[in-house]
Amino acid sequence: MHNTCADKVPNNGFPGFDALINGKHFDAIQIRAGMLWEIKTDNFDTYSRALRDIVLGKQVPELRRERELARACGFNFRVGVRSAAHMAALEELEPTLDVVVMDWC
């Protein structure tokens, strides 16, 4: 599912492949928009509160690091998730993240 969702990012420049930028394999790249993507396909809505906390505790620092790698190379950075709950939880912990619900996934 993860790769399918990444491949369907609108205007993905390399469907079927990751984009290796600054030593990191990003899930998708929109070349004209200058946007690198990280895709999260967690079934977040089904997780217990404890599991949500664990997942978010790992994802938020990782996403911050990936955003900085993208920015260092002149790219913007966006995170695609499968649910509004996952988006809201990420934005609550890191309001500066650009997070969208993937309606194509």
Image (cartoon, rainbow, N blue to C red):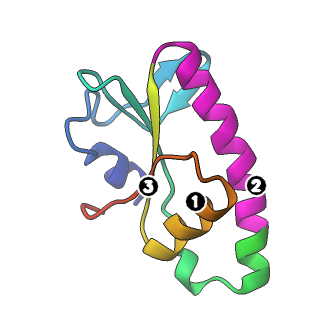
Please, is residue 4 above or below residue 19 in the view?
A: below
Based on the picture, tell me whether residue 64 belongs to the magenta stretch: yes
Disc nearest the viewer among 3 and 2: 2
Q: Which residues are magenta?
A: 54-74
Quick one: quadrant of the C terminus? bottom left
The spot of residue 74 in percent (x, y) is: 47, 14
The spot of residue 92 in percent (x, y) is: 63, 64
- In the depicted view, which residue is nearer to us: 48 or 71? 71
- Horizontal side of 47 relative to 57 (left or right) equals left
Q: Which mark is drawn over residue 33?
A: none
Give, as a three-letter code, the residue at label 2: Lys
Density class for disc 2 (Cα within 10 Å; few <14, some 14-19, many ≥20) is: few
Give the quadrant of residue 16.
Answer: top left
Which residue lies most toward the left here?
11
Give, as a three-letter code, the residue at label 1: Glu
Taking the spot 27% from the left edge, 35% from the top edge, the residue there is 15
Does the residue at mark 3 contact the one at mark 2 (Cβ under 8 Å)?
no
Based on the picture, tell me whether residue 47 belongs to the magenta stretch: no
Calculate the distance from the C-alpha at mark 3 to the C-alpha at mark 2: 18 Å
For mark 1, what is the residue?
91
Q: Name the N-terminal-most of marks 3 and 2.
A: 3
SS under mark 2: helix
SS under mark 3: helix
For mark 3, what is the residue?
2
Taking the spot 61% from the left edge, 23% from the top edge, the residue there is 69
The spot of residue 50 in percent (x, y) is: 79, 81
Does the residue at mark 1 contact the one at mark 3 (Cβ under 8 Å)?
no
Taking the spot 49% from the left edge, 32% from the top edge, the residue there is 26
Give, as a three-letter code, the residue at label 3: His
